[in-house]
Image: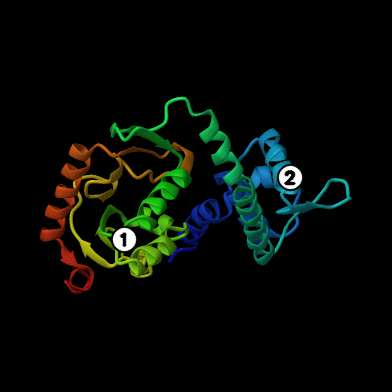
């Protein structure tokens, strides 16, 4: 694989795993490649204006991802990848602890101020989910709560990003409870097949998808769908709709079943 493609993939993985934005990822990788360098030198290498570079460096310094020297001019140095991952993990663990600690109290407070308790009336809901992290979180929760069958239909690039989320772990939980995750994917880049094989889906089939969008659907329950699984690196530009309206959900479920019938098993598709 060409070096430039490797860097581009690493940039995306850093954004998904450590929640860097695109510029932060490029700065970090560039520092690992070049070693200590001034902020103005980085700005020139990455073709970014100095003011933006200084602001971004300050953010990374605050997160302990970059350190600066006491010299004049200051030299920027990136922490080792092992430490960057450790810092990211510690941040997530702190967030989880906070949610666990305050979650129960928050639920009780919300319950106490609810003026119109649910009396059993089922009203379909539809909402817009913004940001790839939020979309993946919703899909992961949907999979974890599934006892039957969920279809996921999306692109290889989207699968490569999902692989770095909690979704593969949620699939394991779903399968232990007797649920099934059926993956439909269109092959347009054989270099990304490894992500599909390690995704943990119950079964994977290959077909021509009707769009470059993303679908996750469970019959009678819920669907999460987007017109296009964003290919750009700005994960906050990713939007999906989520609904439990049965007519919409089951229409999309039927579409996935039709695609499934015409699709080829992954191994057969790879051998043709």
| Residue 75 image offset from top left, x and y in percent | 80, 51
Residue 189 — which label?
1
Q: Is residue 52 above or below residue 252?
A: above
Q: Depth check: give the residue in front, 258 or 114.
A: 114
* Quadrant where the N terminus is found in the figure: bottom left
| Residue 48 image offset from top left, x and y in percent | 62, 39
Q: Is residue 230 above or below residue 17?
A: above
Q: Is residue 180 above or below residue 69?
A: below
Is residue 213 visible in the rendered image? The answer is no
Is residue 243 visible in the rendered image? The answer is yes
Q: Depth check: give the residue in front, 142 or 269.
A: 142
Front of the two marks 2 and 1: 1
Count of residue discs: 2
Please report whichever mark, 2 or 1, sits nearer to the chain's N-terminal start. 2
* Quadrant where the C terminus is found in the figure: bottom left
* Colour pattern: rainbow
| Residue 147 image offset from top left, x and y in percent | 30, 59
* CA–CA distance in space, label 2 to label 1: 36 Å
**Disc 1 on helix, strand or loop?**
loop
Q: Which residue is located at x 68 percent, y 58 percent?
A: 87
| Residue 21 image offset from top left, x and y in percent | 57, 45
Residue 108: name its quadrant.
top right
Q: How dense is the environment of label 2, judged by Cα within 10 Å: few (below 14), some, or many (20 and up)?
A: many
Would residue 239 be found to the left or right of residue 150 on screen?
right
Would residue 107 be found to the left or right of residue 122 on screen?
right
Residue corresponding to mark 2: 39
């Amino acid at each position: 694989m060409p070096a430039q493609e490797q860097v581009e993939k690493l940039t995306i993985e850093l954004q998904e795993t450590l929640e860097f934005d695109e510029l932060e990822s490029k700065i970090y990788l560039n520092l690992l490649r070049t070693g200590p360098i001034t902020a103005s030198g980085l700005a020139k290498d990455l073709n970014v204006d100095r003011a933006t570079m200084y602001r971004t460096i300050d953010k990374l310094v605050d997160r302990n991802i970059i350190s600066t020297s006491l010299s004049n001019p200051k030299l920027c140095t990136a922490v080792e990848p092992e430490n960057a991952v450790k810092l990211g993990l510690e941040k997530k663990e702190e967030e989880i602890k906070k949610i666990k600690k305050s979650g129960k109290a928050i639920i009780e407070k919300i319950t106490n101020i609810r003026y119109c308790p649910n009396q059993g009336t089922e009203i379909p809901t539809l909402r817009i989910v913004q940001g790839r992290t939020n979309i993946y979180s919703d899909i992961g929760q949907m999979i974890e709560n599934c006892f039957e069958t969920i279809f996921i239909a999306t692109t290889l690039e989207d699968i490569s990003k999902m692989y770095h989320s909690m979704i593969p772990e949620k699939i394991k939980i779903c399968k232990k409870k007797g649920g099934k995750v059926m993956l439909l994917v269109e092959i347009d880049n054989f270099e990304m097949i490894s992500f599909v094989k390690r995704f943990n889906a119950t079964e994977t089939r290959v077909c021509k998808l009707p769009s470059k969008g993303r679908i996750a659907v469970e019959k009678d329950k819920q669907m999460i769908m987007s017109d296009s699984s964003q290919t750009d690196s700005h994960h906050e530009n990713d939007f999906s709709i989520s609904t439990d309206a049965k007519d919409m959900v089951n229409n999309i479920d039927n579409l996935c079943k039709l695609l499934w019938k015409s699709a080829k098993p992954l191994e057969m598709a790879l051998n043709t």
